[in-house]
Image (spheres, rainbow, N blue to C red):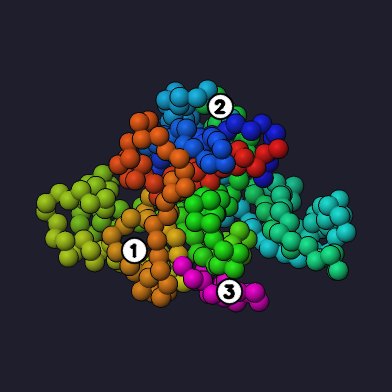
Amino acid sequence: MFRSKSKDLVGLDIGSSAIKSVELRKRSGDYELVGLAIEDLERDSVVDGAIMDANPVASALEKIFARQSSKCRKVAMAVSGHSVIVKRISQNAANDEELENALENEAQQHIPFDLADVSLSYHVLGRDPASNVMDVVLVAAKKDKIMNRTNVASQAGVTPVVMDIDAFALQNAYELNYQPAPDHTSALLNIGASMMNIDIVRGGVPLFTRDVTVGGDQYTHMLQKELDLSFEDAEKLKLGESNGHQQLEALSLHIRTVSEILVLEIHKTFDFYHQTATADTIRDIYIAGGTARTAGLKELLEGEFSVPAEIMNPFRKLRIDAGKFDSAFIAEVAPRMTVAVGLALRSFDLA
């Protein structure tokens, strides 16, 4: 949504349950992991992507940057949810200036908010030289949603340099690590505590994006209700830390019930996508986020959609110093760090 020309920055993913940060360096054509941190957040300090209580979030940010080995305090952040609109449109324009003028009028037809209340951005995917028709991704985010994040960053003493979209950061990490063929269509799912970002992409081109307010917290709430547990005990049980009193069969049933809710939303998204004129067949699914490793979810997706599903590893193509980073920890947190890696990669997009 906005950017500056400073190159060094930290990818900063503020989720509902934790803040994740990643810093990368490019060396000899490869990307190297320089810094990584996770700081859990107090419950309800971030709800459905909105920062509700700035002080604990700013405090968590300060802790993350106090542990960083580098002195970089410039960050790439992202927004998602109902305050963010992503539309793929075709627009006739002879040059960039004409395109910008035309998009201001076009945006009014696609953005369900007062344009004075949003920040607009766009990316040209391609142009037909014969007709001057451009294929464009138009993005709008409510200014108060952006300020909700930038204000807390400033409170913590860090400087927002890039504001991106979670789904696009997810795609950045996917492209680097899996290098899809230009005609290969995949569905990328980032399933966090309270939000699921869905991005259907062909090669490096986003075809359809949707954010849904369902996520890992629904598993916890289900276990709380059905097994009469505290939130903390339900969270531990969800993560496989059994308290020894719950039957495995009952636990699996409750987890599958929530997984089916997630799958229903994914079905709806795929149906919306397939209604478009240029819909390609989805050939595989990649799962990221803190909910990615939920028992049975990967297998349920493969059964429902009859395509391979894989838990995304955003560190797959990165150089990682084994003396600096514990390999077991990297493997454990990998799916949770996907958006932060994608945001850190924005550093290398800047001129």
Q: Residue furthest front?
A: 28
Decide which of tag 3 and tag 1 comes sooner along the chain. Answer: 3
Decide which of tag 2 and tag 3 comes sooner along the chain. Answer: 2
Choose between 103 and 109: the one closer to the eye.
Answer: 103
Q: Using the numbered discs, state the Cα–Cα distance from disc 1 to disc 2 in whole angstroms.
A: 37 Å
Residue 323 relative to residue 138: left or right: left
Q: Position of residue 242 (x, y in %)?
A: 17, 51
Q: Are marks 2 and 3 in contact (CB under 8 Å)?
A: no
Q: Are marks 3 and 1 in contact (CB under 8 Å)?
A: no
Q: Which residue is mark 3?
A: 280
Mark 3: amino acid: Asp
Decide which of tag 1 and tag 2 comes sooner along the chain. Answer: 2
Q: Which residue is mark 2?
A: 73
Any magenta on residue 308?
Answer: no
Choose between 230 and 65: the one closer to the eye.
Answer: 65
Kindly state the secondary structure of the residue where label 3 is placed. Answer: loop
Q: Which residue is mark 1?
A: 297
- Mark 2 surroundings: few (<14), some (14-19) or many (≥20) residues within 10 A: some
Q: Position of residue 148 (x, y in %)?
A: 57, 39
Residue 57 visible (yes or no): no
45 versus 65 height, above or below: below
Residue 5 visible (yes or no): yes
Q: Residue at x 44, y 46 (%)?
A: 315
Tag count in the figure? 3
Q: Using the numbered discs, state the Cα–Cα distance from disc 3 to disc 1 in whole angstroms.
A: 24 Å
Span of residues in magenta: 268-284
Quadrant hosting residue 214:
bottom left
